[in-house]
Amino acid sequence: MAKTVQFHVIQGRLVKDPTLKTTKNGKLLLVFPLAFRSPVKTDDAGSTTSFIDVEMWEKLADYHAARLKKGMEVVLEGHLVQRRWRDAENRPHAVYRFIAQQLAVSDLKRRPEFDHVREAA
């Protein structure tokens, strides 16, 4: 059976500044929570805001680590991954993550200043 990958596009704002980590294998990982608007209500109060943790790996993580800040509006392209595990008491747990493969800053007021622009000025 052929392997299919579903790509998703999501637009939202960074809830806090990203965290750059290095895994045990030496790979760079950038992690941040993203708030985005859902087409359905997400709670009894009528909110339509949802949250998901975003991961960016290696070159993309390195490039965006110093440029992204809390409150920036971004458009991400990537895919969802569900991670499942069992704890010490054998209870199942699961979490969804959005693995970003492309990012564009859509908030022109908070757009980062890129190195080549700064040098030319």
Image (spheres, rainbow, N blue to C red):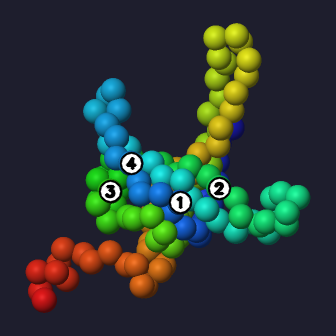
Task: Identify which amino acid the numbered label 2 is placed on.
Answer: Phe
Circle 1 — which element?
loop
Nearer to us of marks 3 and 1 is: 1
Task: Characterize the local packing of mark 1: few (<14), some (14-19) or many (20 or more) Cα atoms within 10 angstroms.
Answer: some
Residue picked out by circle 4: 19
- Residue under label 2: 51
Q: Are marks 2 and 1 in contact (CB under 8 Å)?
A: yes
User: Is the residue marked by circle 3 packed among few (<14), some (14-19), or many (20+) residues within 10 Å?
Assistant: many
Give the SS element for disc 2: strand
Q: Mark 2 or mark 4: which comes first in sequence?
A: 4
Assign a secondary structure to mark 3: loop
Task: Please give left or right for residue 76 compared with residue 108 in the image.
Answer: right
Query: Which residue corresponds to mark 1?
Result: 15
Q: Is residue 42 left or right of residue 26?
A: right
Q: Which residue is drawn at 51% across and 63% down?
A: 14
Question: How many angstroms separate mark 4 from mark 3 (CA)?
Answer: 7 Å
Q: Can residue 8 be seen in this view?
A: yes
